[in-house]
């Protein structure tokens, strides 16, 4: 039987979302430069922008298989006047 040590599961750099601010980058492992399993990062769109679903904030999480649960987000201008 195989066992996965959850402390050995990491995700590489998170997705880059233009016109957003990312919170949680300080949780990067100082030794490996990677993000440990279950790390959650928050993306906040800049003023006047929203994600496709209309929210101004979204999250991604490092999954058990070492990849982020979300690979694409876009902060879109909600009004041409605001952006």
Image (cartoon, helix red, strand yellow):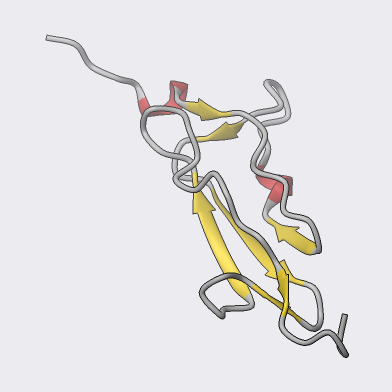
Q: Position of residue 10 (x, y in %)?
A: 52, 27
Residue 78 placement: quadrant: bottom right
Q: Residue furthest top?
A: 1
Q: Does 71 appear above or below 47?
A: above
Residue 58 placement: quadrant: bottom right
Q: Position of residue 49 (x, y in %)?
A: 74, 77
Q: Is residue 57 left or right of residue 65?
A: right
Q: Does 20 appear above or below 4?
A: below
Q: Does 83 appear above or below 72?
A: below
Q: Does 15 appear above or below 21?
A: above
Q: Residue at x 66, y 62 (%)?
A: 43
Q: Residue furthest front?
A: 80
Q: Is residue 73 left or right of residue 62?
A: right
Q: Is residue 34 left or right of residue 66?
A: right
Q: Residue at x 54, y 60 (%)?
A: 59
The number of discs equals 0
Q: Is residue 22 left or right of residue 83?
A: left
Q: Quadrant of the N terminus?
A: top left
Work out whether residue 27 or residue 57 is closer to the camera in this orientation and state it.
57
Q: Residue furthest left?
A: 1
Q: Position of residue 41 (x, y in %)?
A: 60, 54
Q: Position of residue 24 (x, y in %)?
A: 67, 54
Q: Residue at x 51, y 74 (%)?
A: 53
Work out whether residue 6 or residue 83 is closer to the camera in this orientation and state it.
83
């Amino acid at each position: 039987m195989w066992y996965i040590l959850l402390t050995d599961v990491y995700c590489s750099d998170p997705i880059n979302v233009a016109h957003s601010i990312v919170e949680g980058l300080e949780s990067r492992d100082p030794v490996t430069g990677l993000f440990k399993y279950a790390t959650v990062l928050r993306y906040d769109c800049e003023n006047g922008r929203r994600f496709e679903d209309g929210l101004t904030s979204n999250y991604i999480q490092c999954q058990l298989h070492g990849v982020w649960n979300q690979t694409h987000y876009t902060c879109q201008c909600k009004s041409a006047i605001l952006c």
